Amino acid sequence: MTIRPNKFEPSTASYGTTKSKLHLSKSYLIKNSERHLVRKDNIDYLYYAPKIKKIRIFFEGASMCGRIEVKKDLIDSLVFKTLHVHFDAIHNLDLRPSQQASCLTFSHDHLAQVNASWGIQPEWSKHPIINSQAETVTVKKTFSAVYALHRCVVPCSGWFEWTGNKENKTKYRFGHSSNQVLFMAGIMFPDHQRDCSFVTLTTQADEQCARYHHRMPLFIDPLKVSDWLSLPQMDQTPYMSSIKLPFTISEPA
């Protein structure tokens, strides 16, 4: 039986995980949230997600991992070889927040490509948000409901980080030492009226990356991508810390 939005009582809205319910006032929900009806695993979920603004501006260096590298030919071939999915990545060697990236998500019982804009801007936020900490994504109101239902990965060939102060910054490229595709974890904000948006997940930096930043992107093992995207939220704990990967770190020419 489908739960229809106009039959749902906002005072018992599930805000966060589908298991825990917060009793929020009707006026608060109407003012600060949008209702979404989503079907997953033959169950209908109705949840409230924060209203999202289109991103208009991003200040370079305001957040970690502020650029992503997407080499189309490399990624298309390796995604197909690894996951047996036909992929048509948007080529971008300096992908910036607000630009579109090609993501993989789980839809209708199979992996599917979705092109989405990087970053969100909730009504309460003065600045765009491009990532969320993996350690708290399950409990933060802005992210928890979307994390439960709409995880994604961003296949990429590398990412960029800066060191130094505003007047003397050095840009570094991080990539797999064997030139393999990296599956960057993220969560997707679906929207039927406009483009979908996503944010990436970050975790504590490993020894290789810690000298450049105390955080790094969360990466999913290529053999575990399907599990990460499709298994229930309660089974995601093993994937919430980055796998050990050999990185090559260099200054772009």
Image (cartoon, rainbow, N blue to C red):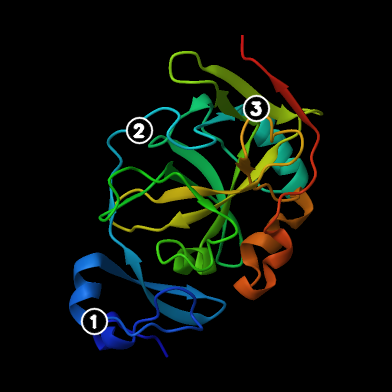
Front residue (pair 166, 64): 166
- For disc 1, the neighbor class at 10 Å (few under 14, some 14 to 19, many from 20) is few
Find out whether the residues at labels 3 and 2 contact each other: C-beta distance under 8 Å: no
Q: Is residue 143 visible?
A: yes
Task: Please state the horizontal and vertical placement of residue 49, each as a whole percent of the image.
Answer: 35, 66
Front residue (pair 63, 11): 63
Front residue (pair 172, 91): 172
The type of residue carrying mark 1 is Ser
Tell me which numbered mark, 3 or 2, is placed earlier along the sequence.
2
The type of residue carrying mark 3 is Asp
The type of residue carrying mark 2 is Phe
Label 3 to label 2: alpha-carbon separation: 28 Å
**Could you tell me which residue is drawn at 77 percent across and 37 percent down?**
207
- For disc 3, the neighbor class at 10 Å (few under 14, some 14 to 19, many from 20) is few
Which residue is labeled 2 in the image? 58
Which residue is labeled 1 in the image? 25
Q: Is residue 8 visible?
A: no
Which residue is labeled 3 in the image? 73
Task: Please state the horizontal and vertical placement of residue 69, each as a whole percent of the image.
Answer: 58, 28
Q: Classify residue 247 by image quadrant.
A: top right
SS class of the residue under badge 1?
loop
